[in-house]
Amino acid sequence: MHRLLSVLLAFVIACGAGCGGGTNCNNTCRSAGATQCSGPQVQTCTADANGCLAWSAAASCGAQRFCSAAANACVACAGTCSSPGSTHCSGAQVQTCSADANGCLSLSVPAACPPGQECLSGQNRCVGPSCSTPKVVAASAPVGPSSDPGTCLRPVGQSAFPADQVQHMGTRTVGDVVSFNVAAGTGSFSIVSQAMNASASDVTFIFGGQDITVPNSVVPVIVSQPDGTTFYDDNAAPPSDPATALAAYAGLTPSTGAFTAPNTTASLNAFDGGVPAGTWSFKVSDFAAECASFGPGSCRDGGSATSTYDISVLTVPARGRSSGTVDVSFYLVTNSITAASAVSNAGMLRMLSTLETIYGRAGVCLGTVTFYDVPAWARAKFATGVAGDRTGPCDELDQMSTLSIPSNTLNFFFVDDIRPSAASGIGTVVGIDGSIPGPSTFGGTVHSGAVVNASDLGHGTCGSSIDLSGCGSDVVAYITAHEGGHWMGLYHSTESFGSTFDPVADTGQCVCTQCAPVASQPKCAANHPSLSPGQLPTQVTVADCNKGGSCDGSQFLMFWLFDATSLGQFSAQQAQIVRANPVVH
Amino acid sequence: MLSILIAAFFAAAGTVRPEPPSASPEEAEVVTKDELSDDDVRDQVNAYLGSIDTPIRANQWKVLGPRAVPLLEQIVHSDQELPTRRAKAIEGLAALGSPNASTLFTEIAAREHEPVVVRFAAVRGLARVTPPRQAAAALKPILEGAKDSRVRALAAEQLAIRSRGKSCDLVRAQVERESEDSRAHYHRALGRCPKEK
């Protein structure tokens, strides 16, 4: 009896572990098919030939699955990446895709790149500057006339490009059709027009029932490709998505202007193998000529069909590389610093270092950096005298640009103040680019430079990383880089109203109606709000535009404003456009 | 060209953009954005101070209302803030017309150690918040007392503008006292005054 009870008890105990198998089984699990975890692997309760149950050897759960202790079963990884070792940028920091203890792939916590490197969003990896230290020099003598010319200068410059890359077409009248050759292997071209005898009067169009007055900007109209198809038509309505246009020409360029392609996503894609070789053509034109051609129904004032321009076409070989060099000139229109002291000034050198870091994100190194003094009369006239809203060829901004010397450099004029608009109620700015893009390789013209308020230089404290809240030299570098970005052909990635965007598809968009504070969205421009007199539509901010999706883009240098969190990045396509500009070699 | 005309309604990129045709003078009454939260106002102030090449209009500051004033005053007073940011904050305060603005701007304009961009903003701001009849009294001490000839010249220009030429005798008298080099700064001020017969 005791033995029977013992057997029964053993059976009960065995059943407690799993009532399967024969009476001689020493089952280690209860029911076939049950699972349990062994670390990240799984064991399955299986029956042997005798029906005895036992846990199998631990086995993998399969690709991107692991055994969850909570469920005692295999579950899918909540992975955030798919390729071990791949990297992803989170701002300027990098995340690495790696397997955790369960074998699941996920992005690591953002970490700083190795010293001297930054995470490039266009490449999703840390990239170190391969640039050599720029050569920083001071010019020995001030540039420009020794006394104020006292008249409006509109010099016609000569390109500093190698002769075999310049097709000088001479003086042409608006309406003339000009042909130029593009050789195989060309990566970009620029049509540079400089006024010889052009109407300096503003032009007033009748558009949408209103009079709109604009400077008489020069623009090539109907640019045709070798196969006869239209590459650009200045009188065609731009597409709703500007990135789909083959060319964008949206700036105001009175007197002197450059039309540089490719500068849109569509043309970058179309020219991936190089600009189509053959004979291109365009019609010389300006707004005055277009206004005259429209007739009185659309042209209120300023129409003229007699202007003449000096025309040059520059061609740049397809570089097929991801880097380039730009030489930079700083014209010190300030009483704060001289060229001789700038080369060793700590604030200036910090500014240069930050500028190189920012441009390095586009694969562009600084080559030779030259500081120039200007004569005393020019400092008195321009250091605090450039008005932000006066951009005509005879206004201070453009006249100051004529001080630049003939060279193929990115020209910046550092000033002490930029005056607010003469029209009351419109505030000041801290940077202005004369035109988008600038007439690269042509120095001394009315648009041969960008102006930057350099008042913050040397102010604040600067640490080891770029600091846009406390380091004044970094702020000056950021503004300089932004205006230089315009010079090299970049537009604001998102304009202030969050309703117009650059012609580049990979810079994100920040749509006001989706990204502005909810209370402000009814007053977004796209909603055609009813506004009080003088009130403007809602404007999008950095904080509105750093969320990804349709609220993206403030991470880029060319966003319309910056704050302490700005990252100053270039998208891959922006970097392509910059590197294709003739100023980059 | 069409893109330019379309952009003229809103904003062209990069360069200082054309005036939207419907914009009215700065003095137009604007409705304060009461619906904005305090955080929204703070964000907007921060945004405007970070504008690069897009000018911020007086009405844009005004719309933020009095809640923006202490935020801007804090920035103007802080020696940790960068000069251009302080100058923009002064511009905002001038637009908002805060009660303390006149006193604050007078103090800053008189400080010789301030960066010129800050002093310039203060001089312009002082001229803006001072009624035209009191412009001479407010600006004359700067015109005659500032050690930096550029600041004196700006005071002269603002005085000529605000008084609509009625204080040009003060401007001309100051020009007479200036050295040959310093007189070069006064061409804008004199340009606001009727030519002497």
Image (cartoon, helix red, strand yellow):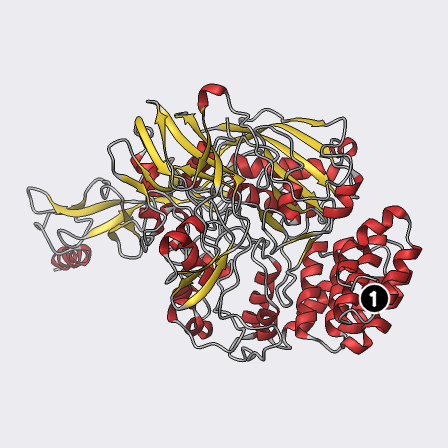
A43 or A422, nearer to the observer: A422
Quadrant for the N terminus of chain A, please.
Answer: bottom left
Q: Position of residue A460 (x, y in %)?
A: 73, 49
Taking the view exactly as shown, the residue that stands out farthest to the right is B177
Q: Position of residue A358 (x, y in %)?
A: 55, 39
Q: In the figure, A548 relative to B71: above or below?
A: above
A45 or A226, nearer to the observer: A226
Q: Report the residue at 29% width, 34% height from top.
A: A225
Q: In the figure, A298 relative to A386: above or below?
A: below
Q: Residues within 10 Å of mark 1 (few under 14, many from 20)?
A: many
**Label 1 marks which chain's residue?**
B
Labels in figure, total:
1
Quarter-of-image position of residue A147: top right
Q: Is residue B190 at all visible to an observer of this figure?
A: yes
Q: Position of residue A359 (x, y in %)?
A: 54, 37
Q: Is residue A464 at all visible to an observer of this figure?
A: no
Q: Is residue A345 left or right of residue A299?
A: right
Q: Report the residue at 75% width, 71% height from top.
A: B164
Indicate the amino acid at tag 1.
Answer: Cys
Which residue is the site of mark 1? Answer: B168
Q: Is residue B51 left or right of residue A9?
A: right
Q: Is residue B195 left or right of residue A493?
A: right
Q: Is residue A512 left or right of residue A432?
A: left
Mark 1 lies on a secondary structure that is helix
Quarter-of-image position of residue B145: bottom right
Q: Position of residue A5 (x, y in %)?
A: 14, 60
Q: Report the residue at 57% width, 31% height from top.
A: A157
